[in-house]
Image (cartoon, rainbow, N blue to C red):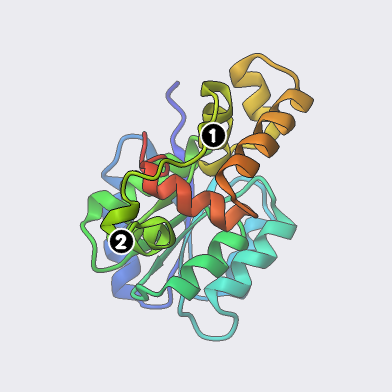
Amino acid sequence: MNARLRIVLAENHATVRQGLRLLLENEPDMAVIAEVSNGEDAIRRARADDADLVVMDLSMPGMSGLCAARELRGVRPDLKVVVLTRHADQTYLHELLRAGVSGYVLKQSAHAELLHAIRAAAGGGQHVDSALTRHLAAPFTVSDPRKAHRRIPAVTDREADVLRLSAQGHSNKEIAQRLDVGVKTVEVHKANGMRKLHLSGRIDLLQFGVMQGWLNES
């Protein structure tokens, strides 16, 4: 497949935008098709369904990257959004994951982190900057050595497969196709696995997925 991933850059600093364009255009599988400087223009540009992905700064004048990400989810639910920010903050991370972004990358990280996030998003997965994974995994970290050998309830291999794919951002329908089972079967495995692991929602699943290394798998 020779098609390049079509990317819109949403960043209000022209110098940063230029650097991002040079970085992405140097990749054989990526092409920057538009540049915008605020959230409103990102949404407007995304309506012309020729874009596959938006790389968006979290802090922009007018509409913030978080609000724009939420809006884009309604306008183009198929569009992937990778957020680029200086904020290594758990609250921002959780809110953006709830908003449906596919990637969260720190501006101060190596360029490879952004490229990995873009490719993961394009493949239907999610990527959280490796510098932030400890925040997501923190609730599952064992601080008391006496509890270190207390095992979590065992999940079946199929339940683990479903939870891993779900944490990576795949829909139940996509998981069913990958595993060659029915959607209802996927729903049952997911519900059973989350019950056994005491996971109450998507953020819990993402946190557990980070601890397992699922979100950073290629």
**Which quadrant would residue 66 be assigned to in this image?**
bottom right
Can you see residue 31? no
Return the x and y of residue 99 as percentages of the image width and height: 62, 62
Label 1: element kind:
helix
Which residue sits at x=61%, y=49%? Answer: 79
What residue is pinned by disc 2? 144
Q: Which residue ends up furthest to the top in the rendered image?
A: 180
| 53 is higher (above) or lower (below) than 94 | above
Which residue sits at x=61%, y=45%? Answer: 50
Return the x and y of residue 27 as percentages of the image width and height: 29, 41
Q: Earlier in the sequence, mark 2 or mark 1?
A: 2
In-front residue for pair 26/39:
39
**Which quadrant would residue 85 be assigned to in this image?**
bottom left
Along the horizontal axis of the image, is 158 left or right of 33? right
* Badge 1 amino acid: Leu
Along the horizontal axis of the image, is 171 left or right of 125? right
Q: Which residue ends up furthest to the left in the rendered image?
A: 110
In-front residue for pair 194/38:
194
What residue is pinned by disc 1? 165
Label 2: element kind:
loop
**Which quadrant would residue 146 be assigned to in this image?**
bottom left
Which residue sits at x=74%, y=23%? Answer: 185
* Badge 2 amino acid: Asp
Specify few, some or many for label 2: CA neighbours under 10 Å numbering under 14, 14-19, or 20 or more. Answer: few
| 38 is higher (above) or lower (below) than 119 | below
- The CA distance from mark 2 to mark 1 is 30 Å
Can you see residue 17? yes
In-front residue for pair 120/10:
120
Return the x and y of residue 121 as percentages of the image width and height: 48, 44
Specify few, some or many for label 1: CA neighbours under 10 Å numbering under 14, 14-19, or 20 or more. Answer: many
In-front residue for pair 78/7:
78
